[in-house]
Image: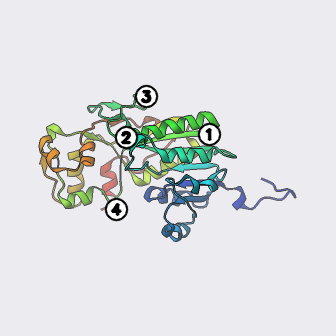
Amino acid sequence: MLNATGGALPARFRRSRVLIVGCGDVGLRAVRLLAGRARLLALTSSPQRVTELRAAGVTPLVGDLDVPATLGRLAGLAARVLHLAPPRSDGVGRDLWRDARSRALAQVLARRVVPTALVYASTSGVYGDCAGACVRETRPAAPATPRAWRRLDAERQWRMFGRRTGTRVTLLRIPGIYAPDRPEGPLQRLRRGTPVLRAEDDVYTNHIHADDLARACVLALWRGRPQRVLHVCDDSELRMGDYFDLVADLHGLPRPPRLPREGAERQLPLMLLSFMSESRRLDNTRLKRELRLRLRYPDVRAGWTAAR
């Protein structure tokens, strides 16, 4: 690329700008993958994170998805957007079923020059309970909780955004994210002795290591097909209790107690029960074929064994 005088532009002007919205654990893993390949910016609602983001090589932009007036500077700012921010967890009224944050972000990104590509991190929870069936991306969504409805609403908004603006939107439906260094996960639950369901009541769950998820996010920014849904999961086919037994055995911890569903409903919080009420096995063929992602941790045994 040449400048007005015929000389080569400095690398900082040639590199694509990538905006990360919701730069938490997975976002920072993506930052490490993108370092040196792109100019990185991140929206944060917490001024206290500015120093941390700068130290990671990211230009921090202070703004709040819940306060649309603070988002104006994002317009026309980046060629690619990685949207990892979840909807509000306490939606009320119409926003109980809708993602107002995605609506606010889409409105500002539609101004000026729109992004070339946008990747949205959704959830496999949009399918609801599939009774253990193998699920492909063509299966109709059937959310069973307000949380999943808000995610589906966000997906629909971004699909419409892509069709309206020409932005190449990729929707990643993500199951349970794990990594030994994440602040909350199976190890913490095992140490607390949180029960799981007995075998006859148990459900299939799906998983992805946080590092593999970050790799999928980065690849989708460049390789994702227009308005396409992808499952980002590994090759595991385990029921939830078997998964926790495996992690316990690998780390020398007691296996979790098993409860009948009726007992679990009396003892466990509603959020955890919602995960125990949905059973499905996600197909990841598109992930491997279209993003050409080779999983570093092809199943949960590989991921947890590497952490020992």
In the picture, measured across the screen, residue 62 lies left or right of residue 201, that is: right
Amino acid type of the residue tagged 1 in the rendering: Thr
Real-space CA distance between mark 3 and mark 4, rounded to the nearest whole angstrom: 33 Å
Among numbered discs 2 and 1, the one appearing first in the sequence: 2
Foreground residue among 268 and 7 = 268
Mark 1 touches mark 4? (CB < 8 Å)? no
Q: Please give the residue where the numbered disc 4 appears in the rendered image.
A: 183
Relative to 260, does residue 194 appear above or below in the rendering?
Answer: below
Among numbered discs 3 and 1, the one appearing first in the sequence: 3
Q: Please give the residue where the numbered disc 3 appears in the rendered image.
A: 138
Relative to 152, does residue 29 appear above or below in the rendering?
Answer: below
Q: Please give the residue where the numbered disc 1 appears in the rendered image.
A: 167
Q: How many labels, in total?
A: 4
Among numbered discs 3 and 2, the one appearing first in the sequence: 3
Amino acid type of the residue tagged 3 in the rendering: Thr
The answer to whether one can see residue 226 in this image is no
Amino acid type of the residue tagged 4 in the rendering: Pro
Real-space CA distance between mark 1 and mark 4, rounded to the nearest whole angstrom: 34 Å
Which SS class for mark 1? loop
Q: Residue at x 42, y 40 (%)?
A: 94
Q: Please give the residue where the numbered disc 2 appears in the rendered image.
A: 148
Please identify, in this view, whether the residue under mark 3 or under mark 2 is nearer the observer: 2
Which SS class for mark 2? helix
Please identify, in this view, whether the residue under mark 4 or under mark 2 is nearer the observer: 2
Across and down, in percent, residue 227 comes to 54, 35
The answer to whether one can see residue 277 in this image is yes
Real-space CA distance between mark 3 and mark 1, rounded to the nearest whole angstrom: 21 Å
Query: Extreme right residue here?
Result: 5
Badge 2 crowding class, 10 Å Cα cut-off, few under 14, some 14 to 19, many 20 or more, is many
Across and down, in percent, residue 92 comes to 38, 45
